[in-house]
Amino acid sequence: MRAKRRINRKRVRYTIFTVLAIIVIVLGSYVYYVYNSVEKTAEDMYTPTEEDKNSNSQEKEEVLEAREPISILLMGVDEREGDVGRSDALMVLTLNPEKEKMQIVSIPRDTKTEIIGKGKVTKINSAYAYGGVDMAKATVEDFTGIHMDYYIQVNMEALSALVDALGGITVQNDLDWYDEGYYKPGYHYKKGEIKLNGAKALGFIRMRHLDPNGDFGRNERQRKVLNSIIDKATSVSSVKNFKEILDALGKNVKTNIAFDQMMDIQKNYRKVLSSIEQYEVTGEGTPPGETYYLIVSEEEKEKVHDLLSENLQ
């Protein structure tokens, strides 16, 4: 079954699991009520891909029950009214329960690559705008050479609602700046440990032009917010807010992970939290004056493929 994971190259919010897991595990006497609430939320979120519609779901069940490694494409989509949006955050997650390890590989949104199904070479985050989840998934698979078993699409507004449902989060800010309008013009994001509500968290991760590290700095802030959400969501104190958390997820998250599969992942894969490894794809930016792209070398692509493959074995 693992042989299916390698794709022939043409060129050589995860947060859901922890939130649902803590709800089911901790609530004790309320578990039946919670179970049904979670099931309803999972049904609202479930959106199969074209591949799912033509595949055997039993095979996926067998993989989860056997505790085989799995891969997940996590997309943070910034959708506005009248605009389908682009995938501003792209991360590939691999979960290996035997090694008790989760891997997060971030792909910068300006990465130049072929958009599979479009026949065009441009920024990787355009794939979602051109062809939705299916095209974005196919493009990431081609870029990494790794089959994506599942996807999770999170509207960036979900992050705001989820942070508010958790009562805010705390992050370490390495850069002092005044907001340009992503949250509130002139708002001071002070260097050091800061507390963020939902709107401030969105402003924190959307800022890019004032960061000397550009997309790489932005991706690092995204990971900080994600890790803080995970820490807060898996704390017992957050269980009382489970209804607000479920509402935030159900309205803003789409995934091809069915409810029964979520329960299998919660049961068989939760120990991957004991070891989380993170990596960001690197490359060279185009010269000033040209449309900006991140040019990723074939050597870097091979490195990314090998990193992901290692945790899927």
Image (cartoon, rainbow, N blue to C red):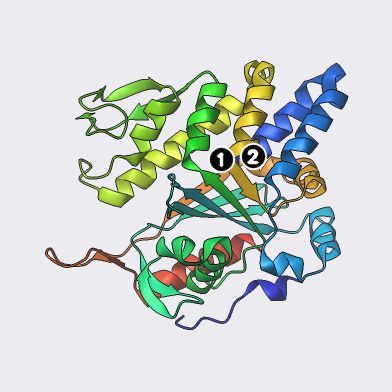
Measured Cα–Cα span from mark 2 to mark 1: 6 Å
Residue 188: quadrant of the picture: top left
Neighbour tally class for label 1: few under 14, some 14-19, many 20 plus, Cα within 10 Å? many
Q: Residue at x 39, y 72 (%)?
A: 113
Neighbour tally class for label 2: few under 14, some 14-19, many 20 plus, Cα within 10 Å? many
Q: Residue at x 54, y 73 (%)?
A: 145
Numbered disc total: 2
The reply to whether residue 259 is visible in this rendering is: yes
Residue most toward the left?
289
86 in relation to 164, above or below:
below
Residue 199: quadrant of the picture: top left
Residue 2's x, y, as percent?
Answer: 72, 70
The reply to whether residue 234 is visible in this rendering is: no
Residue 298's x, y, as percent?
Answer: 38, 76
Q: Amino acid at mark 2?
A: Ile
In the drawing, does residue 14 fall left or right of residue 281? right
86 in relation to 195, above or below:
below
174 in relation to 283, above or below:
above
**Element under label 1?**
loop
Residue 143's x, y, as percent?
Answer: 47, 71
**Element under label 2?**
helix
Q: Amino acid at mark 1?
A: Arg
Residue nearer the viewer, 277 or 41: 41
Residue 59's x, y, as percent?
Answer: 83, 65
In the drawing, does residue 277 fall left or right of residue 270? left
In the drawing, does residue 70 fall left or right of residue 30? left
Residue nearer the viewer, 243 or 176: 243
Q: Which residue is labeled 1 in the image?
A: 13
Disc sitting over residue 16 in the figure: 2
Q: Residue at x 34, y 40 (%)?
A: 206
Badges 2 and 1: C-beta atoms under 8 Å apart? Answer: yes
Which image quarter is the N terminus in? bottom right
